[in-house]
Amino acid sequence: MVPTPRQGDLFAQTSWSSSADAPGLSLSAPQLRQWQRRIQRHQAPLFAGHGQPTALQQTQLFAAPADPLAALAPLSLRPLPLTFWRWPESPHQGAAIYLVMDRPPDLSTPILLYVGETKAADRRWKGEHDCKAYLAAYGDALCSAGLPQQTSIRFWTDVPADTRQRRRLEQALIQAWLPPFNKETRDRWATPFSTD
């Protein structure tokens, strides 16, 4: 049986390490921009359909949306700094889907880097978290290449309280948006940021 060809890996031999004493190759500004643009090309139509102002339409007052993904409007959610969890009071409580985004100035839309779910929005970002390590390495790579970073986190709290239902919604969002820092999609984007 002949193996099917796989999509090439833009950063096949490139590794970014956030550790100052670890050997590794820095990613150049053109490489980082190209990586961001690839993600943006996939996600831009989703941002155009979700979170952009649309014409007002008369709807039924108590009708549930036919597609729960259609209810998410990422750009209408309040952006918070990634250090929000250090605030004396969290702006969000309870179950939530959270979205981590960056807004590269040369792109027409943000890029969605990570989708997660939690039963406690006020506590989820505290402590160790895989996405925090990827974001630190991403931030280091951008800084090293002289590129700006405008990362934020947004919480969607109009989600099921039941963990299984919320996780199904999280997985549906990951499959639709393909955020590069979720483990399910890192290979697709050849996510070049290593936390080793």
Image: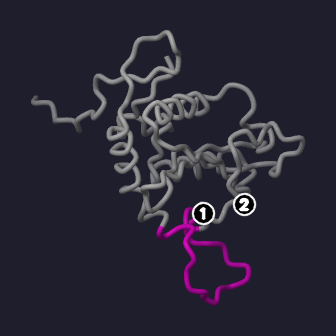
Q: Could you tell me which secondary element the residue under label 1 belongs to? A: helix
Q: Nearer the viewer, residue 56 or 31?
A: 31
Residue 175 drawn above or below residue 1: below
Mark 2 to mark 1: distance in Å? 15 Å
The residue beneath circle 1 is 75
| 82 falls in the magenta region | no
Residue type indicated by callout 2: Asp
Residue 170 drawn above or below residue 6: below
Instruction: Find the magenta span and give its range.
Output: 48-70
Residue type indicated by callout 1: Leu
**Image position of 129 (left or right of 103):** right
Quarter assignment of residue 6: top left
Residue drawn at 71 percent across, 50 percent down? 80
Q: Position of residue 109 (x, y in %)?
A: 47, 60
- Label 2 Cα crowd, 10 Å radius (few <14 / some 14-19 / many 20+): few
| 54 falls in the magenta region | yes
Q: Position of residue 156 (x, y in %)?
A: 69, 56
Residue lying at the far bottom of the rendered structure: 58
- Label 1 Cα crowd, 10 Å radius (few <14 / some 14-19 / many 20+): some
Q: Earlier in the sequence, mark 2 or mark 1?
A: 1
Q: Position of residue 113 (x, y in %)?
A: 51, 44
Residue drawn at 52 percent across, 29 percent down? 140
Residue lying at the far front of the rendered structure: 146
What is the total number of numbered labels drawn onto the structure image? 2
Q: Position of residue 103 (x, y in %)?
A: 53, 52
Q: Could you tell me which secondary element the residue under label 2 belongs to? A: loop
Q: Which mark is residue 158?
A: 2
Q: Which mark is residue 15?
A: none
Main secondary-structure element of the magenta-colored stretch = loop
Residue drawn at 74 percent across, 37 percent down? 124
Residue lying at the far left of the rendered structure: 2
